[in-house]
Image: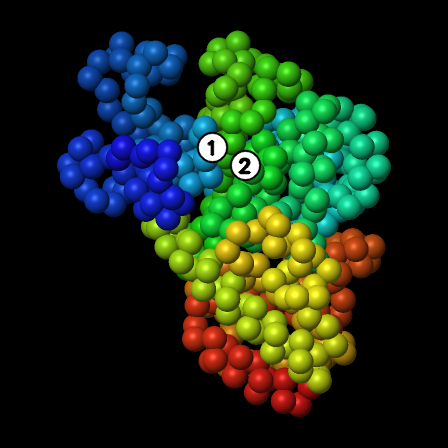
Amino acid sequence: MRQPVSCGLRTRAIHGGIHARRNRGATTIPLYYSSSFAFESAEDLAAAFEGRHPGYVYSRISNPTVQAFEQRIAAVEGGVGSFAATSGMAAIQALCTVLAEAGSRVVFARSLFGGTVIYLREVAQRAGIHVDFVDMDDLPAVERALDHRPRMLFLEALGNPRLDIPPFEEVAELAASRDVPVVVDATLMSPALFPAKQCGAAVVMHSTTKLVTGNGTAIGGVVTDLGQFDWSVHRSPAIAREVGSVGPGYAFLAALRRAAGLSAGLTMSPFNAFLSALGLETLALRAETQSRSALELATYLAAHPGVSGVRYPGLEGDPYHERACRYFHGGGGPLLTFTLQDRPAAFATMNRLALALRATNLGDAKTLVIHPASTIFHDCSAEERDYSGVTEGLVRVSVGLENVEDIIGDFDQALADA
């Protein structure tokens, strides 16, 4: 499709990656479920391995369906290209593999998804990467951490489940002054609500399992280069190698394909890419509906006498409401938390829910609830849980696409005895 710059996000999410003339007129992205691809001659195959001949060699390296999804999400993000990985955690591993190595440093926000914390502690740090955890609201601390010349500064667009929002402009300005790329995990907001490029990010990533796919069917992750960082100044040997081969504009993506795809096998499967590409087509509509319903549920919970606290960035009075209005376009996302007296009260309320499902995903079409302290943060330290706002009475809700009156009614009956 010819995509003029003026095309809006919803248009790009529907038409990006589709090449009807190339794919026999198909109006959706075809599914190429093939491990390998044949060439006309041995010379062509050899040239493809050397990068001198266009074509697909092996689906661990590249695949037409995966590439179409990568093109679609890059178009949505306004980036130069994307790398689709097997999961959100694989996307984080791909970033660490390419940007850092043993003996180097990285800076991560203290407010992180529990799985990211565990990965950094049990994989990255054990591999010799030094991780500095910094409160992004403490700008002097951010500046001191950047003085050590880390390979990246990683933060979440919306903390999970702390629901805090960093001061993106200030952090991006500090990082840019030291030639450090800012990487934003925008999983909780999606490109429909959070314009990562406008907020100074060099790279944006998502667990596509969540809002991008939106229906709980496919595990995946994606990393997108937003074209705002000069990779020729980065000190990663993996990137330096590609700068000399493909130039600084595509060096980061080329390094991801070589290290994370070809060598580590972290490439997304064609079927999951197919499902994720379909999900992108309705992302903007889902994000709008879920944000509106989440705000209504948060408003209801905030007035409930059995609830001691509610956090939702779209709620007036929330400590991050002003930043949500500044950075998030179209709503506060599907995620909120509320607090009850203790774990037994949280469990009892969750068990009385008839519509909402007790499950660990988020951004699904179905409303989901989880008790973070006993699940996604159960391997984290008391200090890590405390900083993230994870208490024994905290319940996290991912608001789905059901009728909002049915969602509220379900919580109303479940909280009746709270």
Name which quarter of the figure residue 179 lies in.
top right
> Image point 53% across, 52% down: which residue?
329
Q: x%, y% of residue 363?
A: 50, 59
> Image point 47% across, 14% down: which residue?
246
Amino acid type at circle 2 is Lys
Q: x%, y% of residue 170?
A: 72, 38
The quadrant of the rendering that contains the N terminus is top left
Specify whether 18 is left or right of 173: left
Amino acid type at circle 1 is Gly
> Image point 58% across, 84% down: which residue?
412
Q: x%, y% of residue 172?
A: 68, 34
- Residue 174 visible: yes
Mark sitting earlier along the chain (2/1): 1
Name which quarter of the figure residue 29 lies in.
top left
Q: x%, y% of residue 279?
A: 38, 52
The quadrant of the rendering that contains the C terminus is bottom right
Specify whether 40 is left or right of 264: left
Tags 2 and 1 touching, CB below 8 Å: yes
- Residue 347 visible: no
Q: Nearer the viewer, residue 112 or 56?
A: 112
Residue position marked by numbered label 1 in the rendering: 79
10 Å crowding of disc 2: few (<14), some (14-19), many (20+):
some
> Image point 25% across, 42% down: which residue?
30
Question: At numbered mark 1, what does the secondary structure look like: helix, strand or loop?
Answer: loop
Residue at mark 2 to residue at mark 1: CA–CA distance: 8 Å
Name which quarter of the figure residue 16 lies in.
top left
Q: Which mark is residue 197?
A: 2
Question: At numbered mark 2, what does the secondary structure look like: helix, strand or loop?
Answer: loop
**Relative to 29, does residue 99 appear above or below in the rendering?**
above
**Relative to 215, does residue 343 appear above or below in the rendering?**
below
Q: Nearer the viewer, residue 102 or 8?
A: 8
Specify whether 317 is left or right of 61: right
